[in-house]
Image (cartoon, helix red, strand yellow):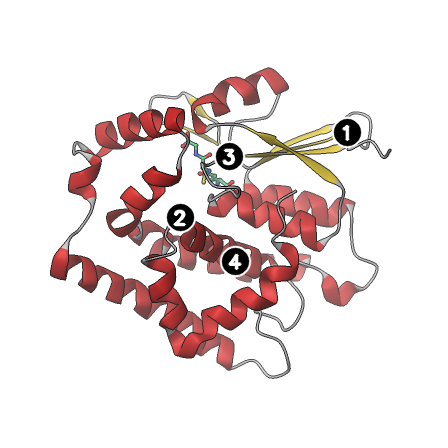
Amino acid sequence: MAVTKIIFLDIPTVLSVPTSPNTWKVRLTLNYKELTYGTKWVETTDIESVCKSLGIPPTSVLTDGTPKYTLPALIDNTFTPPAFLSDSTPIIEYLERTYPDPDSSRALCPPASRALHALFEYHVAHSITAQLLPVMVMHMYDKKTPRDQVHFRERTEAALGKKLEDIELKGKEREEHWKKIEGAFDLLETVMRTRSGAGELFTGPNLSLADCTLGGLLLALRYDSPDEAWMKVSSWSDRKWIRYMAALSKWTAVE
Ligand SMILES: N[C@@H](CCC(=O)N[C@@H](CS)C(=O)NCC(=O)O)C(=O)O
């Protein structure tokens, strides 16, 4: 039996699938590259202690100077010394460098595209991801494991000074907020329509780093909130996002 040398750290939920957009971004890459890997499931509550014990680096530093640890993370034991990685984009760049596809048209993030990809990530983070909490907070909470629910409630309520239930927008305000998010998705669809050639993804039929980012976000919305977020998103942009997810489905397996 082949020994699994790549260990991918992801966050469990009460579903049979993860719901973190950032971990999905790397899982899509691993599946697209057909790499053999095993998942180590780590609840959010344990990310810091597990990463420290394994030697995985933090991804940022908090205002008080404490290092912050996040998932996804990845350990690659294929080489000596092994690679210990965190942060989705650097992990994907490592996988791309270390396991390049012989067909260069299948490259996820050629070095010449890095600046455009960085701009894309910035745009999605600000126009979509940063807008989601007031309409997604309880859906996110519901899908977390019982331990992570306690951890998420404590940290989010302390950071925002409100109960989770009061962060959630209701009624007209909620619908207006969704409309704003719809506008951001429509803009992406308009831009994607300017591309010639076949395929629903950003650069055609093959995956790019931009698709890992957007695809990870769409998967998170679909699994965290099938009855609200995904119902809405799937009706937007002339049903573009249904076709987009169908194109992505080849790479969404969770072993
Ligand atoms: N820049 C990081 C961000 C990763 C991130 O924020 N991950 C979240 C899960 S989606 C996390 O690990 N949160 C743990 C925490 O906040 O303690 C990346 O792109 O990987």
Q: Quadrant location of residue 180?
A: bottom left
Marks 1 and 3, how far apart at CA: 21 Å
Q: Residue 107 in the image: state x and y as whole percent.
A: 71, 60
Is the C-beta separation of discs 1 and 2 under 8 Å? Answer: no
Say which element carries label 2: helix
Marks 3 and 4, how far apart at CA: 17 Å
Q: Residue at horizontal 66%, vertical 71%?
A: 205
Mark closest to the chain's N terminus, 3 or 4: 3
State the residue position of label 3. Answer: 11
Q: Is residue 174 left or right of residue 41?
A: left
Q: Is mark 2 within 8 Å of ligand 1?
A: no
Say which element carries label 4: helix
Q: Is mark 3 within 8 Å of ligand 1?
A: yes
Mark closest to the chain's N terminus, 1 or 2: 1
Residue 63 in sight from this viewpoint? no
Residue type indicated by callout 3: Ile
Q: Residue 70 in the image: state x and y as whole percent.
A: 49, 32
Mark closest to the chain's N terminus, 2 or 3: 3
Is the C-beta separation of discs 4 and 1 under 8 Å? Answer: no
Residue type indicated by callout 4: Gly
Q: Which mark is residue 77?
A: 1
Q: Quadrant location of residue 79?
A: top right
Say which of marks 1 and 2 sits in front. 2
Q: Is residue 230 left or right of residue 70?
A: left
Residue type indicated by callout 2: Asp
